[in-house]
Image (spheres, helix red, strand yellow):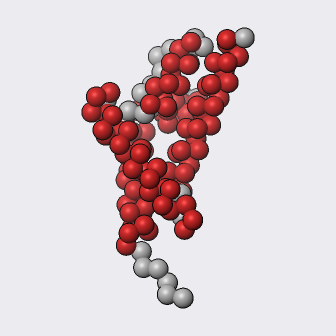
Amino acid sequence: MQSNLFHLLDLLFTIIHILIIVFNLFGWIWKVTRKLHFYMVCLTACSWLVLGFWFGFGYCPITDWQWQVKDKLGEHNLPNSFIKYVCDKIFGGNTDAEFIDITTGVCFSLVAILSVYFNFFHKRSLK
């Protein structure tokens, strides 16, 4: 019974992770989601940088909680990054953590810039 709960929590954390990642990557596109996207980008940046000051750069509490669940399920030696974990699963190997971290950082920086641009500098059409 307890194992089923941990499997359910693992699935829930995976879904939350994927939703956050997809929204962080593409939420700036639609006018209706741009403000929420900006807040989510700020939250992510605060997690990675502010919480990262104490727990390590790039810290994500969701990853931390999910790794605790995976540990209870017997999965050990997990990477620091959920994205690396997913890439390892998809590509069936040990993807380069530095490459994943750099790619993640570059993509996040680009969407953060886009979010700031569309929320604060983009000229709205006059109708």
The quadrant holding residue 113 is bottom left
Question: Can the viewer see residue 90?
Answer: no
- Residue depicted at 63% across the width and 18% down the height: 6
Q: Nearer the viewer, residue 100 or 13?
A: 13
Nearer to me, 65 or 101: 65
Q: Which quarter of the figure is the N terminus placed in?
A: top right
**How many numbered marks are there?**
0
Name which quarter of the figure residue 79 lies in.
top left
Residue 78 vs 114, above or below: the answer is above
Residue 97 appears in the figure: yes
- Vertically, is 125 above or below 21? below
**Residue at image location 55% in from the left, 38% down from the top:** 17
Q: Quadrant of residue 70?
A: top right
Q: Position of residue 65 (x, y in %)?
A: 50, 24
Is residue 116 found left or right of 22 in the rendered image?
left
Name the quarter where the C terminus is drawn.
bottom right
Picture coordinates of residue 87, whole percent (x, y): 53, 35
- Residue 84: % across, % down: 48, 33
Q: Residue at x 38, y 33 (%)?
A: 59
Q: Nearer the viewer, residue 70 or 90?
A: 70
| Foreground pick, 24 / 107 | 24
The image shows residue 111 at horizontal and vertical percentages of 43, 57
